[in-house]
Amino acid sequence: MLDLIIKNGSCYIDGNLKKLDLGITKDKISQIGDLSKEKANNFFDAENLIVLPGCMDTQVHFREPGSTDAEDLNSGSKAAVVGGITGVFEMPNTKPPTSNKKEFQNKLNLAKNRMYCNYAFYFGATPDNHKDLSELKNLEGCCGVKLFAGSSTGTLLVDKEKDIEKVFEKTSKIVSVHSEDEEILNLRKKLIIKGNVLTHPVWRNEECAISSTRKIVKIAKRLNKKAHILHVTTKEEVDFLSQNKGNITFEITPQHLTLTSPECYEKLGTFAQMNPPIRDKSHFDRLWYAVRNNYNDTIGSDHAPHLKKNKQKEYPDSPSGMPGVQTLLPVMLNHINEGRLKLDQLVKLLCENPTNIFRIQNKGFINKSFDADFTIIDLNKVIEIKNEKIESKCGWSPFDGYKFKGTPVATIINGKIKMKNGKILGDPTGKTIKFN
């Protein structure tokens, strides 16, 4: 007797859609094939639906501890599951930051029995926590090291080249980088015009991004270490990074693939403010060039919620960041329907590449004995994003009012159906993600 059979779906296996049934025993995939004669405790009929491996969002900020009025691990994981996301990598720029073993353990304790999706946490780099960074190899639930080369939300910052070098040198983990040059940021602060959010991309300009990224790649290559450049926004970085692959990987966000300046600032004001910023169409086009040609490696939402009352403050007192974990898939599935990318590319960006880059155990593919995490999508269903349907505590989305074709209709995590047609089911039973 199987625990669950997913029947009649088109399953994404080995790069193709195959009409197969999937049998689940406990939290693993136990059978793949025609299971019409098998018995099970539970059935999910995926007729006319596509069954993907569980999609992962490898960049979210769930704000706990410290800013739990805007989000916490529980509410953020609900937003993830409603958005078809089965696992997240959560960021360390909390209050206090997750930059020592005590705070890391505290985060694991806070997550236990409170998160609906599976999870792993980043360990925050500081200029002087090298000893901790050198002891992360087998730390449970640790996906990597997060390095802020330029200041953003929170207090974490490693901006001196010798300190950045030390971080790469000391850790055996992949280093994921918020890549903006602090020196250039400080020099250009004088270009900020109070009350004018259109000066955000002027202040945090292309040079600020590419200068930092060149430095990071140079260090990582010299030390033969893995660097993952987060939320890449510029054509300069796309051209540079696409020539420096191997140990260097990079991410683009759905926001930077959907919104452009100045239109987004004119429409959304400070609600479009994020770091690095949304830029003009010439950068947008180059980001899509990277996606089309399989140069970039992951799509991460950079889910960074803030309360409306704070986002409504006058620029630059308004905080940077926007929620995105719940809308990542609808946004990207709509791009598939509009012919901008293919389904197999999306599966690489959200399932296969994260598994390979971060060496995740038993996820990312529909294989026998792998974890039973699935994102079930309806490519033809049209949905409208509405602020009141956002599960995140912040209660808003930059895509409010947008209609998207294609949406997740079920999320199965560790063999259990946790979301069906937008409704969360059962208790939070997410587990820590394991790494090889």
Image (spheres, grey):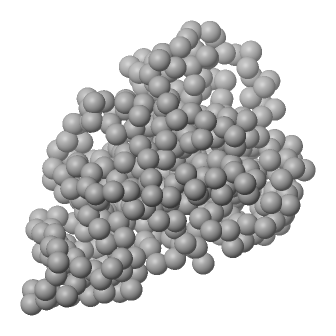
Residue 336 in view of the camera? no
Horizontal and vertical percent position of residue 2: 22, 84
Residue 426 seen anywhere in this rendered image of the structure = yes
Residue 99 in picture, x, y percent from top left: 74, 50
**In the image as oriented, which residue stretches furthest toward the right?**
162
| Image vertical order of residue 110 relative to residue 429, above or below | above
Quarter of the figure with residue 226: bottom right
User: Is 194 positioned to the left or the right of 115 in the image?
Assistant: right
Left-right relation of 328 to 356: left
Q: Residue furthest bottom?
A: 37
Residue plotted at (33% across, 79% down)? 26
Residue drawn at (60%, 41%), measured in percent from left and top? 65
Residue 138 appears at what percent x and percent y?
69, 73
Above/below status of 436 relative to 98: below
- In this rendering, the count of numbered labels is 0
Q: Quadrant of the N terminus?
A: bottom left
Q: Residue at x 34, y 33 (%)?
A: 399
The answer to which quarter of the image holds residue 343 is bottom left
- Note whether 192 is above or below 208 in the view shown: above
x%, y% of residue 313? 53, 14
| Residue at image location 27% in from the left, 51% down from the top | 424
Q: Would you say 352 lies left or right of 123 here? A: left
The one of 72 and 301 positioned closer to us in this rendering: 72
Would you say 19 lies left or right of 366 here? Answer: left
Q: Quadrant of the C terminus?
A: bottom right
Query: Which of the pair 78/185 is nearer the observer?
Result: 78
Above or below: residue 318 compared with residue 17: above
